[in-house]
Image: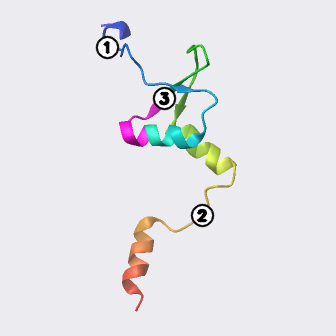
Amino acid sequence: MNVHGIMTRKPITLLADATLTPAVNMLLAIRISCIPIVDAEFRPVGILSWRYILRALQTAGELHDSPPAEDNAAAARKSP
C-alpha cells in the first residue's frame, strides 16, 4: 500500500501569514494534530503541530511554571 491510496485529496490548510488563534481553533474544532501550511498560491511551505505551538509559547515566555492540575484540585478541596 502506498500513501497515495490513503491520503486525503482535500486537505485542511492554513495560510502562512495566519496567527496562532485560528490555528489552535482549527486543531481543536477539527480534532487534528497538525495543519499543512500553504503560501498565497496554496503551495505547501510547512506543517504546524501542537508541539511547535507549545514550543513557541514556551520560548516566548507565555508558559509559566505551575503545579499540575491534580495538585490544584487537591489544594482547592483542602481550602476552607
User: Marks 2 and 3: which is nearer the front?
Assistant: 3
Observer-side mark, 3 or 1, equals: 3
Which of pointers 2 and 3 lies earlier in the amino acid sequence? 3
Mark 2: give few (<14), some (14-19) or many (20+) Cα within 10 Å. few
Residue 3 sits in which quadrant?
A: top left
Q: Is residue 74 visible?
A: yes
| Residue 22 in picture, x, y percent from top left | 52, 39
Neighbours of disc 1 within 10 Å: few (<14), some (14-19), many (20+): few
Residue 6, numbered circle: 1
Which label's residue is closer to the chain start, 3 or 1?
1
Tell me which numbered mark, 2 or 1, is placed earlier along the sequence.
Answer: 1
Residue type pointed to by label 1: Ile
Of badges 2 and 1, nearer the viewer stands 1
Q: Give the CA distance from mark 2 to mark 3.
A: 28 Å
The residue segment tinted magenta is 27-34
> Are discs 2 and 1 less than 8 Å apart at CB?
no
**Residue 18 appears left or right of 68:** right
Q: To which residue does mark 2 refer?
A: 65
**Does residue 31 appear anywhere in the picture?**
no
> Does the magenta portion include 2?
no
Residue located at (62% from left, 48% from top): 57
**Of the pair 19 and 45, the residue shown nearer to us:** 19
Disc 3 marks which residue?
35
Q: CA distance from mark 2 to mark 1?
A: 41 Å
Q: Are marks 3 and 1 in contact (CB under 8 Å)?
A: no
Q: For the residue marked with disc 2, what is the amino acid? A: Asp
